[in-house]
Amino acid sequence: MQDNAIKDIVIVGGGTAGWMCASALSRMLGDKLNITLVESEQIGTVGVGEATIPNIAQFNQMLGIDEAEFMAATHGTFKLGIEFVDWGQIGESYLHPFGNHGIDMDGVSFHQYWGRLRASGDTTPIEEYSLSAAAARASKFIHPKADPRSILSHMSYAYQFDATAYAAYLSKYAQARGVKRIEGLVEHVTQDQNSGFITSVKLQDNQDIRGDLFFDCTGFRALLIGKTLGVPYEDWSHWLPCDSAQAVACDINGPVIPYTRATARSAGWQWRIPTQHRTGNGHVYCSAYMSDDEAGHILMDNLDGVPHMDVPKQLRFKTGKRQKLWDKNVVALGLSGGFLEPLESTSIYLIQAGISRFMALFPDKSMPRIDRDEYNSLLDKEFDQVRDFLILHYVATDRDDSSFWNYVRAMDIPESLTRKIDLFKSSGRFFRYDGELFTDTSWIAVLLGQNIIPQRYDPIVDTLDLERVKDSLGSMYGAMQNAVKCMPSHQDYIAKFCPSPLRVNS
């Protein structure tokens, strides 16, 4: 019988996507496969900070990575959520926390009880019933507890780190487990005349790297999936119109906070990602409503530390995704497969999802169509669900101070998102579908934070006496405040748990 097992895998492109892929493959299949990664130091990266969501911990745990070592190597800080400033109206802010809002009671979601108190005149923001939000606002941190009886079990966290350092860390990890790294630029891609499968990539120095399976991690160039196989790109810029970004790092000014900040500007928004050795900043904007010069001035004028360069790095992009993320014997990961702006820090998660889905469908050399179709269907859902959540931030606004905000506030949106918003507006109900990434806590944080208030609360909560509801929520609030008081500062916790040797400007 002919051996049809995959033996040689080639990853074209390094960076976060390439080295996450190489690390996962080497961890799971390194003794059964020859894994080669081709990258070039001539191709630079933005490298001004990367924010993540809690799912990354699962990836690192799968790799067996020591958390403190990883954080020190990547100058990492903890992240308890994302603060959104000026999104609903100018002057307003709210926090999208990781973890829960309060505690569900009698099988009814916590926010329904919060809604009943609000209807009775209580104006306490829902984020004040989130332990992660309370700790973030106080710049405190402690690791969550696994014991569900502990209030600390209601916290969740992610990381903020130097993306370039993370790629370098994973590069060492993967190479130590047998991944072969080749430095070079791809000059030519060879395909089988009959199947169209890619058979090899030829480098400028004439090296010919053959493989049974290829991962395209070449970023926006999409060298394999786009330029070679010609898989079309679905343009989502009518829903997510920002198409440009400028990025710059600056010195740290004050204690490092345990959350990312996204501040809405007149034609987009500005990110702030604090790591141990610097603060990453960027301005994402729509070039149809703002010039590059104006965007650069807004960014540089709103830094809270000395910038590390005089002129920010410029990026261009188009939000959307490939119609197929796995075509023939090529799987696209990262920017080569699609781009959703970093508003909710999902870029690394989508790479992670692509890797995990592929491992669950690992093929033989024939690349069965049913496997490819299933992979593409699963990733389509992932991208669509994240897309809808990002669109929500734009359409759920009261801002009318610029042409940009007037456009996004009134634009047509996917029916899947319209249904969720309308259901929530009616009675505060929310349901997750197909195991989607963002929980009801995430959606509710944005909906309420941007002034989409339900017309009524779930009538089931009226079965409880109002005073009992007040007592229960008051008890939750008090317990969370007491827990936060006992936590160490985020700055002190990092200094003891994972200090980076390159920490500066402390």
Image: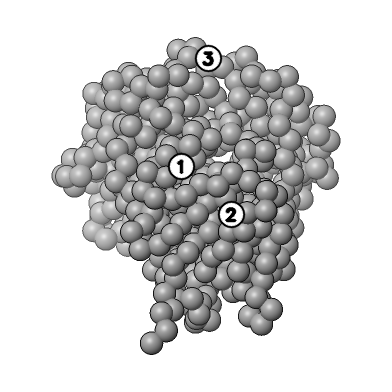
Sequence-first disc among 3 and 2:
2
Q: Position of residue 8 (x, y in %)?
A: 47, 64
- Kindly report which numbered mark, 3 or 1, lies closer to the viewer in this rendering: 1
2 or 1: tag closer to the N-terminus? 2
Q: Position of residue 132 (x, y in %)?
A: 36, 36
Q: In the rendered image, which quarter is residue 33 located in?
A: bottom left
**Residue beneath label 1, please?**
171
Closer-to-camera residue (324/44) = 44
Q: Secondary structure at mark 1?
A: helix
Distance (Cα) linking label 3 and label 1: 31 Å
Q: Amino acid at mark 2?
A: Val
Q: Is residue 492 visible?
A: yes
Q: Which of the pair 8/392 is nearer the observer?
A: 8
The amino acid pointed to by label 1 is Ser
Image quarter of residue 154: top left
Judge whether 386 appears above or below 198 on screen.
above
* Mark 1 crowdedness (10 Å alpha carbons): few <14, some 14-19, many ≥20: many
The residue singled out by tag 2 in the image is 12
Residue at horizontal 78%, vertical 39%? 402
Q: Are marks 3 and 1 in contact (CB under 8 Å)?
A: no
Query: In this orientation, which residue lies closer to the viewer: 183 or 407?
Result: 183
What is the spatial separation of the Cα atoms under label 2 and label 1, in whole angstroms?
14 Å
Q: Are marks 2 and 1 in contact (CB under 8 Å)?
A: no
Verify CB contact (< 8 Å) between mark 3 and mark 2.
Answer: no
Q: Position of residue 469 (x, y in %)?
A: 27, 47
Residue to which mark 3 is pinned: 253
**Residue positioned 62% across, 58% down in the render:** 208
**Residue at point 34%, 53% (across, down):** 27
* 151 on left or right of 391: left
